Image (cartoon, helix red, strand yellow):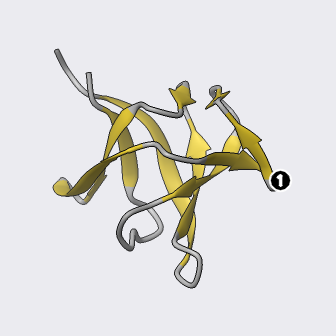
Amino acid sequence: MADYKVGKITHYYDKIGVAVCELSGDLAVGDKIKFSRGGEELFTQEVSSLQVEHEQLKSAKKGDIVGLKVDSEVKEGAEVFKIQ
């Protein structure tokens, strides 16, 4: 099964470890995702927290801009893929 792109990182807040992600697909808490930049895989993790305007969500859909708690630093422009 192929991984498919669900978003792109538009900002990263290093003090709180949160990335802002513009979604191009659906994403939910518990999904396994990987971050990639310039064709290089950065890291994988499970979605533990999704927020929109400081409100916790269980899932978000295409077009939403969400805050995503990340395990490692991730740069702007990194792509987010859902792992099947």
Residue found 19% across the figure and 21% down from its top: 2
Residue reaching furthest to the bottom? 15
Residue found 50% across the figure and 57% down from its top: 9
Q: Are there few (<14), some (14-19), or many (20+) residues within 10 Å of tag 1?
A: few
Q: Position of residue 3 (x, y in %)?
A: 25, 27
Residue 65 as seen in the image, left or right of residue 76? right
Q: Closest to the observer: 44 or 38? A: 44
Q: Amino acid at mark 1?
A: Glu
Q: Quadrant of the C terminus?
A: top left
Q: Position of residue 51 (x, y in %)?
A: 70, 48
Residue 49 as seen in the image, left or right of residue 79? right
Is residue 28 depicted above or below 13 in this figure? Answer: above
Residue 78 as seen in the image, left or right of residue 24? left
Q: Position of residue 56 (x, y in %)?
A: 74, 44
Residue found 52% across the figure and 72% down from its top: 17
| Secondary structure category for the residue under label 1 | loop
Q: Position of residue 45 (x, y in %)?
A: 32, 48
Is residue 73 depicted above or below 48 in this figure? Answer: below
Is residue 60 depicted above or below 33 in this figure? Answer: above
Residue on which disc 1 sits: 53
Residue 62 as seen in the image, left or right of residue 76? right
Residue found 45% across the figure and 42% down from its top: 47
Q: Closest to the observer: 42 or 49? A: 49
Q: Quadrant of the N terminus?
A: top left
